[in-house]
Amino acid sequence: MSLVFYVLAALTLAGGLAAVLLKNLVHCALALTLAFAGLALLYLELDAQFAGFAQILVYIGAVAILVVFAILLTRGSETPTAGGIFSHTWLAGLAIAAAVFAVLGWAVLQTAPLLPGAAPAPTVTVLQIGSALMGRYVLPLEIVALLLTAALIGAVIVAMHEKEGAK
Amino acid sequence: MTPLAGYLLVAALLFAIGLAGALTRRNAILVLIGIELMLNAANLNLIAFWRYGPHPEALTGMMFAIFSIAVAAAEAAVGLGLVISIHRHAHTADVDQMNRMKG
């Protein structure tokens, strides 16, 4: 376990915690971007360069911007701070999350001695990824293309402004 | 502790943080942010298993993570579109007040 891993893990978890705990929604979006960046760096640390850069492009470049746009478009109706930022069933939610983490952590620690140890870094070039995408994974790739097109059209239709009286 | 166990623990913690955010926040956008964090935690697991698994040259885990990133992007776009649509109809993004279908 290297120092880099601990620093990146702390960065990612701090970003994630801030994203769900902060009061100002714009601050939440910025903390979410920090968590995404930490995850991208963790992917690079795991020698998955392609996934790391895809994470930066898709999450920091697109999803974070989408979140900021949605926050700005739904602004003005922010609930008055009476009642707080947490739902009134927050205790149950926190208990469920803690229970899930307890089960996951227990499972990881139980199987930790059986997990494979340090392995030599795999050498995967973008050429190999490209030929895998065009060869073995070409059907999933086409389905993802269809899904993205459907999501694009669907998001526009769902969020489109309906005129008064128009069908 | 092996490196893989460390990554798995970080992913479990990130998943729990996202789940707690999705279950406890009142704003619908924050619920979506929690879901994004959970999806990212799953991706971290996939990449970690790919890196320390027996056959990294088969690229299975990394391809799974890349497709998962693409599906998560589609989910984010549709989810935020839905939030904007609900906000236009109900003039609120508070999930506690979206109780029109409550029995």
Image (tube, rainbow, N blue to C red):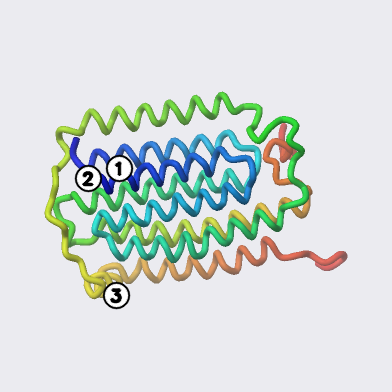
Front-lying residue, A71 or A27: A27
* C-alpha span from label 1 to label 3: 36 Å
Which residue lies under the disc numbered 3?
Answer: A134
Work out which quarter of the rendered image holds the C terminus of chain A and state it: bottom right
Q: Are marks 2 and 1 in contact (CB under 8 Å)?
A: yes
Foreground tag (1 vs 3)? 1
Q: Which mark is residue A2?
A: 2
- Residue at the (40%, 71%) spot, across then down: A142
Label 2: state its secondary structure.
loop
- Residue at the (69%, 61%) spot, across then down: A159
**Which chain does the numbered disc 3 sit on?**
A
Asked if both marks, 2 and 1, belong to the same chain, the answer given is yes
**Which chain does the numbered disc 1 sit on?**
A
- Residue at the (26%, 72%) spot, across then down: A126
Label 1: state its secondary structure.
helix
| Crowd rating for badge 3 (residues with CA inside 10 Å; few <14, some 14–19, many 20+) | some
Q: How many numbered dots are placed on residues in this image?
A: 3
**Which chain does the numbered disc 2 sit on?**
A
Asked if both marks, 3 and 2, belong to the same chain, the answer given is yes
* B94 left or right, relative to B41: right
Q: Are marks 3 and 2 in contact (CB under 8 Å)?
A: no
* C-alpha span from label 2 to label 1: 7 Å
Q: Earlier in the sequence, mark 3 or mark 2?
A: 2
| Crowd rating for badge 2 (residues with CA inside 10 Å; few <14, some 14–19, many 20+) | few
Residue B28 percent coordinates (x, y): 64, 45
Which residue lies under the disc numbered 1?
Answer: A6
Q: Amino acid at mark 2?
A: Ser
The image quadrant that residue B85 belongs to is bottom right
Q: Amino acid at mark 1?
A: Tyr
Q: Which mark is residue A144?
A: none
Label 3: state its secondary structure.
helix
